Amino acid sequence: MKFYVLTTFPEMIEYIASVSILGRAQKTGDIEIIPINIRDYTNDPHKKTDDYPYGGGAGMLMTPQPVYDAWEAVTKKAGHSIRTIYLTPQAKVFTQSDAVSYAKEEDLILLCGHYEGIDERALEEVVTDYVSIGDYVLTGGELASMVLIDAISRMVPGVLSNSDSGKDESFSEGLLEYPQYTRPAVWRGKAVPEILLSGHHENVAKWRKEQAIERTRQRRPDLLEDTNESSADCPEDAIPGKLSEFDK
C-alpha cells in the first residue's frame, strides 16, 4: 500500500516513517510512505506556498496552485484516481473502523494543511475525505497524517508480525483493550491475575472480555452505546482490583 503525503515539511514525515513498525514495513515492501514537497510545485520564484486571506484575518493561507499541481502530479504518475484525505479539525473524528476501511485501498493521498489552512477552491478540486484526529488545532497536518498512516498500516496484511495483534487492540470490537501483564509474576507486591497463568484459554478469553467491558464502562462509557455490550455483561467481581470467579 502506498501513502502519498502532500506537505510543505517533508522532513517531518521522513523521520517518523523511518522508525519502528513503519520503518520495518517499508523495508519489507508491505507499505510505502512517499512525502511530496508542495513547494516543488509552486510557480512562485521564492517557493512561497502561502498568501494573505481575502477578507482579512490573522495568519496566512496556502494558495491553491501548488497544492493542486502536487496532487495532479501524484495522480497522473499513479495512472488512476486516488482517495484523498485532508486532515482538518472540521471533520468527523477518525476511528479504528476507518483505519480498517482505508487499509483496503491500494493508495491514499494525505493532504497536510499549514498556517490557517488551504484555499477552499483547491480542497473542492482534490479532496474526497475530510478527517480529524480530535477536537483541537495543530500547527499543521503532518502529525495528524502520520497518526492515520500508523493506524491504517497496522491493518495492512504483513505489517504486524503477529496477524492477530490488530484484532485484539482497543476499539477493534468497539471496546477498550483488557489489561495486560508480563514478567515478573509479582512486582512491587502486585501479582498477575491467576487466570492468566492457568493455561485455560477459554477462561482467559472470558476474563479478558469481562475486563474489556468494565474498562470501557469506566473510561469510555460512550462506546458502550454503540455496541451490544454493557456493564451488565460484566460481573461486579470482574472490576479491576477485585478477584473474578477465575481468580478465587
Image: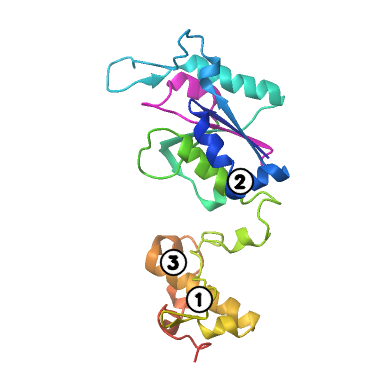
Counting residues from the N terminus, which is met first, the one under dot 2 or under dot 3?
2
Residue that mark 1 sits on: 210
Q: Is residue 103 visible?
A: no
Quadrant where the N terminus is found in the figure: top right
Farthest left residue in view: 57
Q: Say which quarter of the image contains residue 225.
A: bottom left
Residue placed under numbered mark 3 in the picture: 216
List x then y, in percent, for residue 9: 48, 28
Which residue is found at the position 43% from the left and 74% from the top?
Answer: 231
Say which element carries label 2. helix
The magenta stretch is: 105-127
| Disc 1 crowd, CA 10 A, few/some/many (<14, 14-19, 20+) | many
Q: Amino acid at mark 3?
A: Thr
In the rendered image, residue 120 lying in the magenta stretch gets the answer yes
Horizontal side, residue 220 vs residue 126: left or right: left
At 70% from the left edge and 26% from the top edge, which residue is drawn? 78
For disc 3, the neighbor class at 10 Å (few under 14, some 14 to 19, many from 20) is many
* Residue 158 in the image, given as x and y percentages of width and height: 71, 51
Spatial CA distance of label 1 from label 3 is 10 Å
